[in-house]
Image: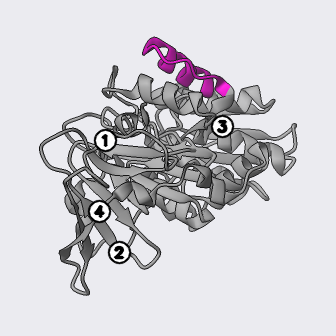
């Protein structure tokens, strides 16, 4: 789960990674002095003390995959030649609620993040944070940023909970209809802010279903949509309620915030993601949901329209291949993977991996050293 921006320049402690449209992956390592270049969009006159290029005395070892998926070393004099600042005016980056992510881990910022965000903004870049985590509202995320010393407005945050509310608004969902939520407070808040009546959520996590002979489970016939997201309070009551609404209420919509199978809810292990809750309702209703979070087209189209910008001017930055990078690729955006969250370099470089980012780096703040004067 995460947040998204739009603008990218990376310099990393270990590797520079680049994958072009032919699915090639390159790898640059600069030696013991200074940071090692990962990726960046920088002007040709940018002062980057990387020790490469004319007079630098060091080549950068780039690696590309052969037909068998193995890394093969080649040489290139200056990886900065890959970077063009004018090619990207907005960056989409992924900041996750999970303890392992792009912007923070638990209640601690990843090193260098505040300085990096400030630097990008000072260069006129628009930052947008997009997250698949539906457990919080935009307001709650803004408070989270503030508690970590970063000023981010609600208008810069796009959560899958907000996306669900916006979807219902854009299709002119009837105001007299109700929305049942299999999820947490973030979805309820965003639906209510959008003017909809929402039921369920954490409160229904306290309820139980009575499986008795001749028992009739009652549900609200005015529910016109069921929204399913990550739910720590999932139970049989909620599953039955949502199932009945979708199967028995004419025209009832089945909306999923996202389908992430697992997520790094803690820094030690992965936990079931929203996709598990969505799969349960898919099974009981035999229907497929409308997905509004990453990597769905709905959320990207919403962002493109809101900011009036073309995909070629955007770079999606995230820590997941199956959501963040695919989200950007589906829209034709530049993509940059950070290895500070879900995806490891071994997973990225595995020959079986079919989703290759255009660039990759170890963490968001790697770009700071590359772009600073």
The residue singled out by tag 4 in the image is 77
**What separation in Å lies between label 1 and label 2 (alpha carbons)?**
28 Å
Mark closest to the chain's N terminus, 4 or 1: 4
Q: Are marks 4 and 2 in contact (CB under 8 Å)?
A: no
Is 149 inside the magenta-drawn segment? yes
Eye-nearest disc, 1 or 2: 2
Q: Nearer the viewer, residue 181 or 166?
A: 166
**What separation in Å lies between label 1 and label 3 (alpha carbons)?**
21 Å
**What separation in Å lies between label 4 and label 3 (alpha carbons)?**
46 Å
Q: Which mark is residue 24?
A: 2
Residue 217 shows up from this direction: yes
**What separation in Å lies between label 3 and label 2 (alpha carbons)?**
36 Å
Element under label 4?
loop
Q: Which mark is residue 264?
A: 1
In the image as oriented, which residue stretches furthest toward the left? 32
**What separation in Å lies between label 4 and label 2 (alpha carbons)?**
18 Å
Eye-nearest disc, 4 or 2: 4
């Amino acid at each position: 789960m995460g947040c998204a921006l739009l603008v990218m320049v990376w310099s990393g402690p270990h590797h520079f990674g680049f994958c072009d449209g032919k699915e090639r992956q390159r790898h640059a390592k600069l030696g013991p002095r200074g940071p090692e270049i990962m990726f960046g969009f920088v002007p040709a006159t940018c002062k980057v003390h990387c020790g490469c290029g004319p007079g630098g005395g060091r080549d950068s070892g780039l690696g590309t995959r052969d037909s068998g998926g193995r890394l093969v070393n080649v040489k290139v004099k200056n990886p900065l030649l890959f970077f063009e600042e004018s090619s990207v005016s907005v960056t989409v980056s992924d900041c996750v609620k999970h303890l392992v992510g792009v912007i923070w881990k638990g209640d601690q910022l990843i090193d260098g993040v505040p300085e990096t965000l400030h630097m990008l903004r000072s260069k006129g870049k628009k930052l947008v944070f997009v997250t698949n985590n539906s457990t919080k509202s935009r307001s709650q995320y803004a408070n989270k940023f503030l508690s970590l010393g970063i000023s981010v407005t609600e208008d810069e945050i796009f959560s899958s909970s907000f996306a669900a509310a916006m979807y219902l608004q854009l299709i002119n969902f009837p105001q007299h209809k109700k929305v049942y939520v299999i999820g947490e407070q973030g979805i309820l808040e965003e639906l209510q802010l959008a003017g909809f009546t929402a039921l369920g959520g954490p409160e229904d996590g306290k309820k139980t279903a009575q499986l008795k002979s001749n028992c009739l489970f009652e549900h609200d016939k005015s529910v016109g949509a069921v929204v399913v997201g990550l739910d720590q309070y999932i139970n049989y009551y909620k599953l039955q309620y949502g199932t009945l609404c979708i199967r028995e209420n004419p025209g009832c919509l089945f909306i999923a915030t996202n389908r992430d199978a697992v997520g790094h809810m803690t820094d030690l292990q992965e936990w079931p993601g929203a996709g598990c809750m969505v799969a349960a309702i898919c099974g009981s209703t035999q229907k497929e949901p409308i997905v509004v979070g990453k990597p769905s087209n709905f959320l990207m189209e919403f962002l493109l329209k809101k900011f009036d910008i073309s995909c070629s001017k955007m770079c999606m930055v995230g820590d997941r291949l199956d959501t963040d990078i695919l989200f950007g690729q589906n829209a034709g955006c530049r993509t940059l993977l950070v290895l500070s969250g879900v995806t490891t370099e071994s997973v990225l470089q595995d020959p079986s991996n079919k989703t290759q980012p255009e660039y990759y780096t170890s963490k968001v703040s790697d770009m700071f050293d590359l772009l600073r004067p």
